[in-house]
Amino acid sequence: MLPLFKKPLLAYHAGLFSLVFLTGVAAAQLTSEYIILGSILFVEYFILLIIMLHLYDKYMKPIKKTTQTVNELVKGNYRVRIHHSAGGNIAELNNKLNALARNLSEFEIQEQMQEDRLSTVIDNTQSGLVLIDEKGYIHLVNRKFISMFGGNAHDYQGYLYYDVLADETIHETVQEAFLYETNIKHSFTQTFEIDTKYIEIVGAPIFNERGMLKGAVLLLYDITHLKKLELMRKDFVANVSHELKTPITSISGFAETLLSGAKNDKESLDRFLTIIYDESSRLQGLIEDLLTLSRLESDEFKIARTDVDMNQLIEEVLPVIDQRVKQKDITLTTDVKGDITLRADGERIKQIIMNLLTNAISYTGENGAVNLAVTDEGESIHIHVSDDGIGIPKEAITRIFERFYRVDKARSRNTGGTGLGLAIVKHIVEVHDGNISVESEPDKGSTFHVYLPKNDPASS
Ligand code: ADP
């Protein structure tokens, strides 16, 4: 098929030839010289036509192809190649163009890969990120930022930061970063849906190669977890100070009273010394519990697992609490079905049982009943300690494992409680990969359930 624009050329030559031929024929009737002249003209035009077609194929067509390819490259289509079998300079030019297209397409692939890598990092970073230009327009927000502030990227990108971000601290951070051209750090609270988050914001100015301010990048860190820990630590220190202050004040107060004359009165001497002794025992108990908790929480803490025979362990615990049981006339029953052994830290398991039994006795009235049962449940053992004591109100059940939480502060103190017993139990259960729960009804009693795996889960 000939290209379209070649058709008029052909038509022109054919027309010219026909005109000459017809004129020739007409003239032939007149003279034979005209026939010869007509034939010569016909041959001449035919040769001229062939030459023109040849020239078009050799020079015009490759140039046209090359121009098309360059146009495609200019448009950014680097996949385009020239497959025309031209020779000479045009062939060399085509080869160079193909090499250029190949290089550009490799460059494009690499650039795309780099862009993908960068956006993966930006989107998966655990801090919110906002990119602002020197006029204050937001160019980029990442996924974490969206999860903190809601909406989607289009709600922020392309807008002025102060039009779409309401918090004053963010505005201050951007303005200060622009003004002082240095990193600025602030923190604020952000409420999204029902959650309140503590956010630390760092505004860092960005400069171009000539050191001129180009914009700023904002990094937003969710520090809610750290804030909560800080708050817990502050509460803990306040609680410990308070717990220590009470017995110490009492000890020094009674010692002072004795020194200022009461020691001469035999009755007062006995009474005050008993109080000093009781308060110092409480102090000792508190310090022991605090040390136990801090040991359990330390990074170096490791449980020493051995084969623990539950019958034997209970035999060792009972004499320790015997005096308290007798004092309150409590009926203590134990129920261990058969030989039950588990791989655990014996001393810690003993502490679990001791703390649960001590509580059961403390929070049960005189003549009450306390039962300790251990059952083998295949993969785990189930320790349950129940009493028919005062029980725990429903709203307090989730809080009793918190440090220093007590339903009735006065009652706990009177029984020598430190408010740390259940926190210690929960810790020990957790380091053994077990779990603990409680069922209780006020004035009816409570049952604590502890499940511990029989074997070390880490070794299976
Ligand atoms: P405490 O030294 O005060 O006993 P714990 O951490 O052992 O501290 O217990 C926390 C609180 O849980 C207690 O103050 C008490 O109010 C409640 N509690 C624990 N065990 C029982 C129980 N068996 N019956 C009723 N209340 C209990």
Image (cartoon, rainbow, N blue to C red):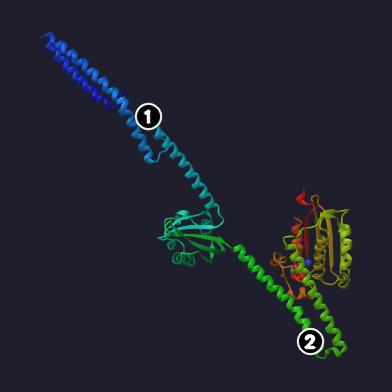
- The residue under label 1 is which amino acid type? Ala
CA gap, disc 1 to disc 2? 111 Å
- Quarter, ligand 1: bottom right
**Residue that label 1 marks:** 91
Q: Percent x, y for residue 393?
A: 72, 68
Tally of numbered tags: 2
Q: Element at badge 1?
A: helix
Evaluate if marks 1 and 2 touch, with contact meaning CB atoms under 8 Å apart: no
The quarter of the picture where the N terminus appears is top left
Q: Residues within 10 Å of mark 1 (few under 14, many from 20)?
A: some
Q: Percent x, y for residue 421?
A: 77, 67
Residue appearing at x 37%, y 29% in the figure: 91
Question: Would you say the beta carbon of the disc 1 residue lies within 8 angstroms of ligand 1?
Answer: no
Residue appearing at x 40%, y 39% in the figure: 77
Which circle's residue, 1 or 2, is located before the other in the chain? 1
Residue 442 appears in the rendering: no
Label ID, residue 256: 2
Q: Percent x, y for residue 298?
A: 73, 62
Residue appearing at x 40%, y 41% in the figure: 76
- The residue under label 2 is which amino acid type? Glu
Q: Percent x, y for residue 447?
A: 78, 62
